[in-house]
Amino acid sequence: MLCFSICKAGAQAVTSYSSNPGNATATVAGRGDTIYTAHSSPFQINKISASGVETAFAGSGSLGNADGTGTAAMMRYVYDLESDTAGNLYFTDEVAGSLRRVTPAGVVSTLATGMSGVRSVALGLMDTFYTYAPSSGIVYRVAPGGTVSTYASGIFGALDLDFVSPGNFYLAGYLNHVIYRLSGGAFSILAGNGSAGNSDGTGAAASFNNPSSLVVDGLHNIYVTDFSGHLLRKVTPAGAVTTFAGSGTAATTDGTGTAASFNSPQGITVRRTTGSLFVSESGSGATRQVTDVTALPLDWISYSASLGEPRHAYIRWVVKEKDVHDYQVQKSTDGRTFSPIGTLPGKGNGENSYSFTEPQPLQGKAYYRILQTDHYGTYSYSPVLSLTGDDLRQVDIKVYPTLIQESFTVWTEQVLQALLLDARGQTLQVLQLAPGHNTIDASGLSSGHYFLQAGSHVYRIIK
């Protein structure tokens, strides 16, 4: 996962985004930032337009389990929705023990079975899914092709599972009023004391009241819907819990921060291009929008690594920054374990260029990344680039424009393979570049931030 955003709380304005009389049980931001919400009355998944109008997308409205297109398909209670960069939606069927997919055209199909009691689903790397069954406490792994295996077990009564990074997940512990962390197959409690409540604090000093759903931002902060507490909570990676929005009264009231109210908030998602949160309410059927959630004080404009004489790594990056404290250059010999090799202070708000030359000459192959920390203590990482002794002469590459509409151009002086990545670092396309000017079709991309990684260069592209 690649994250280039810094998330800080501001004035959390809560507004009603759409209204539906049925219970809203789950929500997700899909391709093009379209919001999808699942309801249990009627039993279907709806699409919400930018103006807040809900229309039926998939599901007949009757309780059942049948594949098909649009309203010809049937579904039961949908407690969680996941999406991928191609525009597909995913959900589980608790009774059938299955993982199901909905294409952008509304075609519903079953991808995998044999997972009794699964309610939640999370998409990991390389098209691998993870599902969770609260009744058995099992987390299943669904490999590409549908092969199911047990990934972890031992925690019962949670409702939602979210992927953070390889081997790391968070779970909303509905029955036990805690937030769990699953790391390397082992469970631990990140926050909550096990009793129902609404106390802010760190670790066991905090309390929740039936946390039902969660979403993780790029800095691993967690936003949690507190179902019976009628609140939206925020949990940092260190387990510090604060009330993010909501008065604690069961109502659908717009407002800012604690002046707003939620009515049994159940599902939650984040719109990646703006940082706004969307919360679905079981009590009212409404979908609410929480704005002013995410500031973007750092934009990576370009980032490159090259070798200079006598084989010293030269790291250069250009950023548009705000409130940045420093940049730490890190190095690894295996691409997994990184150590700092130098730190540069931030230059101040605006567009700035930085460069760093490694003091020691390069031996063999090495990997480089940059840890950026702002004045508030939050941080993000750059992509990882690699260098070897063969990189002494760098291939010249140009990418233009970087603010695109239907296409962009990549110029290179020799045959080269490049990767087009989404904002989360997942590969969308593998591009085979020929010498000269290569026109890349971007008409199928939704609005948002993308990255082109070519050789030891990374370029940001905005559509």
Image (spheres, rainbow, N blue to C red):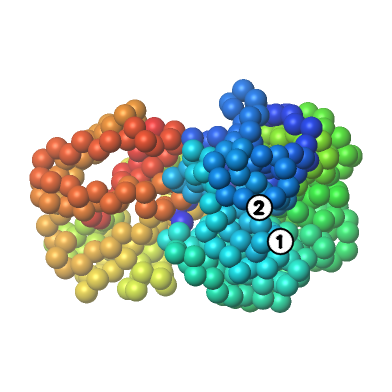
Q: How far across and down, in percent of the image, does residue 360 sit?
A: 25, 70
User: At 59% from the left edge and 27% from the top edge, which residue is drawn?
Assistant: 49
| Amino acid beneath label 2 | Asn
Q: Real-space Cα distance between discs 1 and 2?
A: 9 Å
Relative to the observer, which residue lies in front, 412 or 366?
412
Quadrant of residue 196 within the rendered picture: bottom right
For residue 65, the mark is 2
Mark 1 neighbour class, 10 Å CA radius: few under 14, some 14 to 19, many 20 or more: some
Residue displayed at 27% across by 66% down = 359
Disc 2: CA contacts within 10 A as few (<14), some (14-19) or many (>=20): some
Res. 87 visible in picture: yes
Q: Are marks 1 and 2 in contact (CB under 8 Å)?
A: yes
Q: Where 259 falls versus 136 (above or below)?
A: above
424 is higher (above) or lower (below) than 182:
above
Q: Residue furthest top?
A: 51
Q: Secondary structure at mark 2?
A: loop
Question: Which residue is drawn at the image coordinates 59% and 75% (left, top)?
Answer: 150
Q: Position of residue 217 (x, y in %)?
A: 58, 50
Q: Amino acid at mark 1?
A: Val
Left/right placement of residue 50 relative to residue 177 reads: left
Mark 1 sits on what residue?
Answer: 95
